[in-house]
Image (cartoon, rainbow, N blue to C red):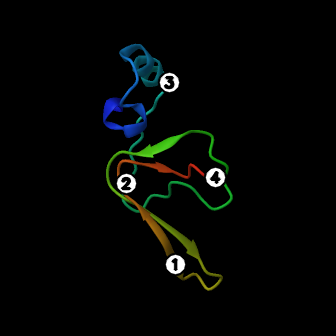
Amino acid sequence: MLREIPIFKDLSNEELEKIENISIIKHYKKGEIFFLEGEKPLFLSILLDGKLKIYKTSPKGKEIFIHEILPINFVAELA
């Protein structure tokens, strides 16, 4: 699966194995929160399947759509 991610496609089998040994695949349910504004990411996260909706909530509780992330993409890499 790692070789399907563009940033890893040219790595050797040994390098891929090292990354695989420290990697975790985590599944989320629809509507589950991945992260909240202000949280500092501790890991490099890559969306492999599904889509991730990025939004802010106004003081009145209304969702303000910002962006949608589709696979295969980094999540919060700039944070």
- Distance, label 2 to label 4, CA atoms, is 23 Å
Characterize the local packing of mark 4: few (<14), some (14-19) or many (20 or more) Cα atoms within 10 angstroms.
few
- For disc 2, the marked residue is 29
Per the image, label 4 sits on a secondary structure element best described as loop
Quick one: label 3 or label 2, which is nearer the N terminus? 3
Q: Secondary structure at mark 3?
A: loop
Residue located beneath label 1 in the image: 63
Image quadrant occupied by the N terminus: top left
Residue at the extreme front of the image, as rendered: 10
Q: In terms of sequence position, does the residue under pointer 1 or pointer 4 come before the other?
A: 1
- Near mark 2 (Cα within 10 A), the count class, few <14, some 14-19 or many ≥20, is few
Which is in the foreground here, disc 1 or disc 4? 4
Where 27 sits versus 70, above or below? above
The residue type indicated by label 1 comes to Glu
Question: Residue tagged by mark 4?
Answer: 79
Measured along the vertical axis of the image, is residue 75 above or below residue 55?
Answer: above
| Residue visible at 67% across and 49% down in the picture | 40
Considering only order in the chain, which callout, 4 or 2, is on the residue closer to the N terminus? 2
Mark 3, residue position: 22
Residues at circles 3 and 4 in contact by the CB criterion of under 8 Å? no
Q: Position of residue 31 (x, y in %)?
A: 41, 63
Task: Residue 28 in the image: state x and y as whole percent.
Answer: 40, 50
Give the Cα separation between the discs numbered 3 and 4.
21 Å
In what element is the residue under mark 1?
Answer: strand
The amino acid at mark 2 is Lys
Badge 2 or badge 1: first in the primary sequence: 2
Residue at x 54% of width, y 83% of height:
62
